Image (cartoon, helix red, strand yellow):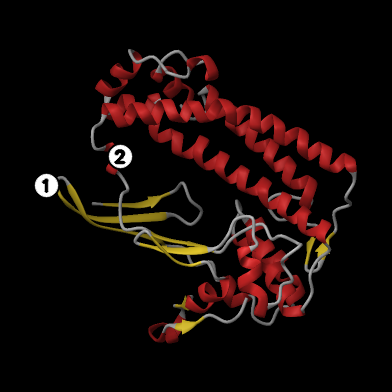
Amino acid sequence: MSWDPITRIVGNLGIYTKIDFDNREVVECKSTSSIFRGYSVFMKGKDPRDSHFITSRICGICGDNHATCSCYAQQMAYGIAPPPLAEWIVNLGEAAEYIFDHCIFQDNLVFVDFCEQLVRETNPSLLERAEQTPAPNAEIHGFRTIADIMRSFNPFTGETYKEALQMSRLTREMFCLMEGRHVHPSTLYPGGVGTVATPQLFTDYLVRLMRFMDWIKKAVPMNDDVFDFFYEALPGYEEVGRRRVLLGCWGAFNDPAVCDYKYENMADWGRGMFVTPGVVVDGELITTSLVDINLGIRILLGPQAHRGLVAPDP
């Protein structure tokens, strides 16, 4: 069975499977993205000082991440480090971006798979059970039954769905306070930021963050109630998505007290990140060194692909 395109991502997702229906087992599953963006091609010959403004355009959702990584790479290339306050502003912008991404993904995309409208069409008996199942955390989130929560997930009409859109707007505002514009930041530069740091700026950010945290305190118990219900009502559901564990993280949120952007010190300032890097293979932590991770990357583009070229320094 194949599903292509799945349009919840930028660039379309294709899922190709081989399924053993007699044994109810997915024997093979592969995902592909059919779009070629070509940024590695048309960046050639451009002034590197413009690279973060150009590379942010690779995505209309997470452009900030590309711009930030470009500035990191430029700072390493130029042998410079931003002032500590500028680094904290970048971190706050990235944090707002992370919260925005999670809100859009979890509450406006993932929850659609568990909404009343979809479950009614695909598994009506499950919805009937949800109608009769009290929500354990009703006193926190305000929904009496599991089905009430599922109705709130309905796209464009559900209470939670619409509220999540408002919350994601808050996180965009937080981002714009730090980096000027979302999704393509206008105040990011190698060596610093163009944001004017004032007490009012950080207060405006904090007010929005606290409003979002109040909502999270309601949303998490709502997640727990729905997912616990699915695990209990559909035995074996916890096995969905289980596969070999291969995880890689390049880290996030540099600590200005540790990070000097020098390659020879990259393993140290990588481990000093507030989200530390690492590679996990089959449950075993292989390395936490950014240098090891960098040297282990392979470029698989163009006629040299079969040679497995090692990536250059950032």
Mark 1 sits on what residue?
23
For image coordinates 48% across by 57% down, the residue present is: 11
Q: Quadrant of residue 119?
A: top left
Q: Quick one: 15 or 188, which is closer to the camera?
A: 188
Q: Quick one: 16 or 283, which is closer to the camera?
A: 283
From mark 1 to mark 2, how far is it between C-alphas?
17 Å
Q: How many marks?
A: 2
For image coordinates 60% across by 62% down, the residue present is: 58
Compared with residue 36, is residue 223 higher up or lower down, i.e. above or below?
above
Compared with residue 301, is residue 64 higher up or lower down, i.e. above or below?
above
Q: For numbered disc 2, what is the local secondary structure? A: helix
Asked if labels 2 and 1 touch by Cβ distance under 8 angstroms, the answer is no
Q: Residue furthest left?
A: 22
For image coordinates 31% across by 21% down, the residue present is: 127
Amino acid bearing label 1: Asn
- Tell me residue 15's x, y (percent): 33, 54
Q: Quadrant of residue 229?
A: top left
Crowd rating for badge 2 (residues with CA inside 10 Å; few <14, some 14–19, many 20+): few
Q: Quadrant of the C terminus?
A: bottom right
- Tell me residue 208's x, y (percent): 73, 34
Mark 2 sits on what residue?
238
- Tell me residue 27's x, y (percent): 20, 56
Closer mark to the observer between disc 1 and disc 2: 2
Amino acid bearing label 2: Glu
Would residue 134 appear left or right of 218 to someone viewing this image?
left
Would residue 189 appear left or right of 103 to someone viewing this image?
right
Mark closest to the chain's N terminus, 1 or 2: 1
